[in-house]
């Protein structure tokens, strides 16, 4: 047999059919991929092998140790620097496949093939996004290599105890500032990002500090429901936040987690010759992700 599992897409005209996305076909036609966390992380693409190696520099410039005054006519002393490597191995490939019977596609009043093609691509994109976010979260509680800092957890109970959207937004903004400061203090001056679910993102918009002219300029639009930055970190809405208790947001730089990529998401349509004019749509990817520079990640929790 060419495959196991379901034999045909869920096609029907009544509301008892279980559909993967409760939206109109026209909306699916306009679907565009949202920014994915993997886009903001340190990624290495390989052509073979079991994984990728990332070089890590130790932090040696925080104190004056090993910096000496020179005395004329004497030999200089040498000291050790710190470098290390982290290897991130590939996970087994992950895939999803659908089969579209030729007759079902022919009698449908919409483009069955295009919809399935988009759906499986979108599904795996979200799988990858959840995997990347999980790697970032793991970095926030991980121990860094010797001479490097650890991840940071910012706890702000006001996020849970506040009684208005504005107060919750203020507490989130304060926590983002604290997380950014913690990462900056560990010598990561790269661009930073904040992952928030849409609910917490809406609270930040309702914080006067995020949008009001007294505190910011051209940072978004209340009516349009947009806010761009808090504390110098770019806000990113996602529905793929981990279900970790009390987790409200993640703040990270591109080195927080490493991504080893053998295959980005690949989608193809092939003839399923065991069935009458059937097409099989399949998508797959192969990558590995893990914490890299833990001090470049911070989680914000309400308890």
Image (cartoon, helix red, strand yellow):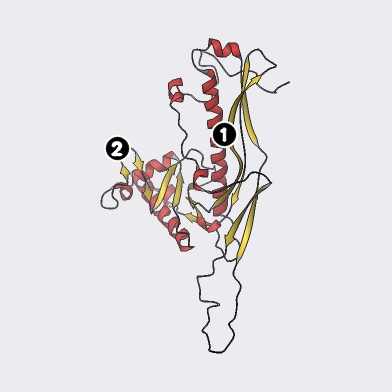
Q: Callout 1: few (<14), some (14-19), or many (20+) C-alpha neighbours within 10 Å?
A: many
State the image coordinates of residue 19 (x, y, percent, origin top left): 53, 22
> Does residue 296 appear in this view?
yes
Q: Secondary structure at mark 1?
A: helix
* Nearer the camera: disc 1 or disc 2: 1
Can you tell which mark lies on residue 106? none
Q: Is residue 259 left or right of residue 302?
A: right
Q: Residue at x 51, y 76 (%)?
A: 64
Q: Residue at x 37, y 49 (%)?
A: 229
Extreme residue toward the right, this view: 1
**Residue in front for this viewpoint, 37 or 82:** 82
Q: Residue at x 34, y 38 (%)?
A: 225
Q: Is residue 192 left or right of residue 210?
A: right
Can you tell which mark lies on residue 124? 1
State the image coordinates of residue 70 (x, y, percent, origin top left): 52, 85
Q: Is residue 262 left or right of residue 248?
A: right
State the image coordinates of residue 11 (x, y, percent, origin top left): 56, 16
**Residue in front for this viewpoint, 272 or 230:** 272
**Residue in front for this viewpoint, 244 or 128:** 128
State the image coordinates of residue 5 (x, y, percent, origin top left): 68, 23
Q: Quadrant of the N terminus?
A: top right
Q: Is residue 198 above or below residue 58?
A: above
Asked where in the image residue 74 lies, by quadrant, the reply is: bottom right
Q: Is residue 102 above or below residue 83?
A: above
Asked where in the image residue 204 lies, by quadrant, the reply is: top left
Q: Which residue is mark 2?
A: 223
Q: CA distance from mark 1 to mark 2?
A: 33 Å
Comes first in the chain, label 1 or label 2? 1
Asked where in the image residue 163 lies, by quadrant, the reply is: top left
- Counting the numbered discs, the total is 2
Q: Is residue 188 above or below residue 40?
A: below
């Amino acid at each position: 047999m060419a495959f196991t599992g379901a034999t045909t897409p869920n096609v029907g005209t009544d509301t008892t059919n279980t559909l993967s996305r409760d939206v109109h076909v026209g909306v699916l036609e306009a679907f565009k991929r949202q920014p994915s966390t993997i886009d903001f992380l340190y990624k290495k693409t390989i052509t073979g092998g079991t994984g990728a190696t990332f070089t890590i520099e130790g932090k040696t410039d925080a104190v004056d140790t090993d910096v000496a005054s020179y005395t004329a006519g004497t030999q200089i002393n040498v000291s050790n620097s710190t470098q290390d490597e982290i290897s991130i191995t590939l996970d087994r490939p992950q895939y999803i496949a659908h089969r579209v019977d030729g007759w079902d596609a022919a009698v449908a009043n919409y483009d069955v093939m295009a919809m399935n093609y988009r759906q499986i691509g979108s599904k795996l994109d979200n799988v990858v996004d959840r995997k990347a976010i999980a790697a970032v979260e793991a970095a926030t509680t991980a121990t860094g290599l010797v001479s490097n800092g650890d991840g940071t957890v910012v706890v702000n109970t006001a996020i849970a105890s506040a009684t208005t959207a504005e107060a919750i937004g203020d507490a989130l903004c304060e926590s983002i500032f604290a997380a950014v400061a913690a990462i900056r203090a560990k010598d990561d001056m790269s661009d930073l990002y904040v992952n928030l679910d849409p609910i917490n993102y809406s609270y930040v918009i309702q914080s006067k500090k995020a949008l009001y002219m007294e505190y910011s300029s051209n940072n978004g639009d209340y009516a349009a429901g947009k806010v761009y930055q808090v504390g110098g970190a770019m806000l990113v809405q996602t529905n793929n936040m981990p279900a970790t208790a009390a987790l409200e947001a993640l703040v990270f730089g591109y080195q927080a987690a490493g991504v080893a990529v053998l295959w980005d998401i690949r989608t193809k349509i092939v003839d399923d010759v065991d069935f009458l004019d059937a097409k099989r749509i399949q998508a797959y990817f192969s990558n590995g992700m893990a914490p890299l520079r833990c001090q470049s990640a911070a989680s914000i929790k309400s308890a």
